[in-house]
Image (cartoon, helix red, strand yellow):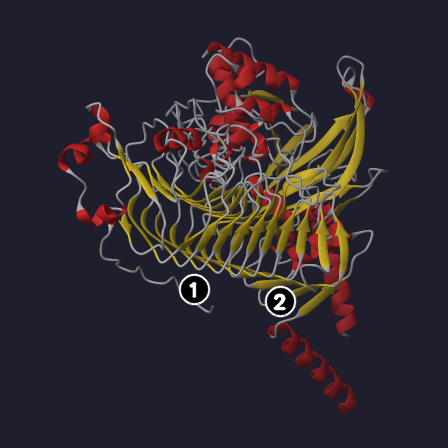
Amino acid sequence: MHKIYIKIILFFSLAVIQNLSTEEISLEPSLNSQEELQEALILINSGDTLRLSKGTYYFEDGLSLDVDNVTIEGAGMNETILNFSKQASGAQGLLVTSNKVTLKGFSVEDAKGDAIKVIGAKGIYMINVKTEWTGGPKSSNGAYGFYPVESSDVLIDGCVAIGASDAGIYVGQSSNIIVRNSTAQYNVAGIEIENSYYADVYDNLASHNTAGILVFDLPDLPQQGGHHVRVFRNKSIDNDTDNFAPEGNIVGEVPRGTGIIIQANSDIEVFDNDIGGNGTVNLAIVTYGYDTEDENYYPHPRSVQVYDNRFGNSGFDPDLETGELAAILFELSGGEMPDIFWDGILPMSQIIFGQPDNEKIILGDNGNASFLTISPIKYMIGMDPVNTDYDSFRGEIKPLKAVSIEGI
Amino acid sequence: MSGLRAFVVFIFLFISHQIYGVNDSVILADKFPKTLDEFAFFEDKKAQDPADGVLPYELISTLFSDYSYKQRWVYVPDGRKATYEEDWVFNFPVGSALIKTFYYPLDERSLDKGKNMMETRVLLRKESGWEAVSYAWNKEQTEAKIKIAGKTINASWIDQAGEQRSVRYRVPNKNQCKECHATNDEITPIGPKARNLNKIYHYEDGSVNQLTKWLQQEIIHNYPENLVSPVDWQDESYSLEERARSYLDINCGHCHAPTGAANSTGLYLNFSESREKHLGFYKKPVATGRGSGGLKYSIVPGKPEESILLHRMISTDPGVMMPESGRALSHSEAIELIGNWIKSL
């Protein structure tokens, strides 16, 4: 009698312990992966890890996760493949809408829309994950590989993004962001930070995209006025893929062979990067180029510091067909494309009275980099507006603070 | 002894369930029951005849779901009432349930030939808030079972024109319910706003305005007298503008609103939006990707063929189409309506 009681007590206490501790669930590829994995993503409890064994999993519908504080971990980005080539519904491969989620060691292939979309997460950590469209650059590929939006504490570390028809790694309307040790190739934009605050982008390789790294800001959105973005120790090289973005998208205007574009953001640092082999221009600092009625939107870049970069070849194969940037620059420079271009566009009051010191573009040492900007006032009075005087933009560099993410 | 007690309790529950109708404890339980039966929302197995206290209702303007038909019921526990919320769904008391069955008539030309039920979705008002789950019907139409991960059903029917139609019908998973039914990240009903219920319903005991009936049945405390209601988008006695905006409100406005899941797009199609740019007029896409179809603006007034909004309504490609979930077919009648509206702008 007593023995039975003890057994029962033991059984229940074990059950309680198991419930409290974190659990690991494992899945293997099967013919029923859609239901098995989606069910696991719904039933997983906070603190648990879902392990995806080596192999290829096929899906007909998008997957989604809405549980906080969980880890989804594969056997490695080349071992565990989530394949969406037969997808018949769902606007992305994997959708995450919960907080403190770690995605690790798997690949999302051939999603019909975006590969991994994350909406409104406080804490999303993507580590050694790959997103790829395997048929090479095509306008029928999905828009984004990694797509966190309206999120905070965003880590993208050791990831690989290939073939996105917009941006391989795209962080939009988010804050507190680190993108590092990652590779973006054969996308329209390799890495794009848009309408975001406090982002560090470093130790990445962006090559063979249309453009390597973009820091953009657009009007008429809930979060705008992008600021505090540091782009450093990256290689943005040999971006030589023709623009294959569907028309209508802002990146569709970006010319092939662009290293880095900074547009309509403030408090930006670009330093210690290798930028070269970009046929149109290595670095462009520009104003948002369209009319907008949004009174809360500031279309001009402010306080951009560029220093200690190593500039390689550029301007040897300008893409005059796509957008206006390359054509304008080609005309202004008489075919001698600069390494660094600033469009010089300012609000009317600043054209007349000058730009406040703390909003100026500052150039530090950048080897033998060439520079070109335009003087709007000279342009207006009919004088030659082109200014290539690098030294007149030299100034004291005031480094920005590093981004830190709690627990990382 | 304890076995006997359990038996008596079981019998008591069984009997009380039969007499009192809806099983309130199942609505409030932590876990969803495995089958729809266990709620006892219906007196019959085929979920046609509602139990006591379960009242059918209709909405003025409804969401397109691949031409499926929908039957709706509301349940509010005895002695409790929902309160009116301005511009929003009624605030239902804990223990309430909203029930919706999706089905295809075998033949749309003669509805009495029978129907094929796909799923019954329930929204349950628990202590902690609303929860959503769906029960998929088996082929024999004898049982509806919970489908946490959703289900694909290949369905077919004969339409008004006598054509055989078919669809890859998707029963949504729990997360997909939230894609539409979330406001500020909380699950919420979409349909039963006072303004959307403000119409005559043909009850078995006579025809009367639904809000009047809900007041009589003590489902609600109150509702305001001067409601501005959306219109039935199919009712051609209303203006093109009213019909189009009503359609966009119920089909797009739950996500495309400043508080909805698609607020990051800046495109707002809810009924109360009046800023032209946010309604999409000459609005450039943000993160649309190939959804743009090579077009430049969400809406180009006067030019439906150049408007991304219409392009994404027409498409059935999962990477392009809108809404993102809940449809596999395009809604040709609505495409005509929205096309005409854009042309008229």
Chain of residue at mark 1: A
How far across and how far down the image is residue B45, in percent? 79, 40
Which residue in the protein does label 2 denote? A48
- Is disc 1 placed on a helix, strand or loop? loop
Q: What number of labels is visible? A: 2
- Residue type at mark 1 is Ile
Q: Is residue B294 above or below residue B304?
A: below
User: Which residue occupies 47% across, 26% down?
Assistant: B195
- Return the residue found at the far right: B140
User: Which residue occupies 63% across, 72% down?
Assistant: A19
First in residue order: circle 2 vs circle 1: 2
Q: In this view, does A34 lie to the left or right of B321?
A: right
Q: Is residue A305 above or below residue B322?
A: below
Q: Nearer the viewer, mark 2 or mark 1?
A: 1
- Return the residue found at the far left: A353
The reply to whether residue A225 is visible in this rendering is: no
Assign the N terminus of chain A to one quadrant of the image.
bottom right
Label 2 and label 1: CA atoms lie apart by 21 Å
User: Which residue occupies 48% across, 29% down?
Assistant: A320
Q: In this view, does A372 lie to the left or right of B163?
A: left
How far across and how far down the image is residue A65, in percent? 61, 53
The reply to whether residue B103 is visible in this rendering is: yes
Q: Residue A405 carries which label?
A: 1
Q: In which quarter of the image is residue A371?
A: top left
Packing grade of label 1 (10 A; few <14, some 14-19, many >=20) is few
| Front in this rendered view, residue A379 or B69 | A379
Q: Is residue A175 above or below residue A144?
A: below
- Residue type at mark 2 is Asp
Chain of residue at mark 2: A
How far across and how far down the image is residue A127, in percent? 57, 62
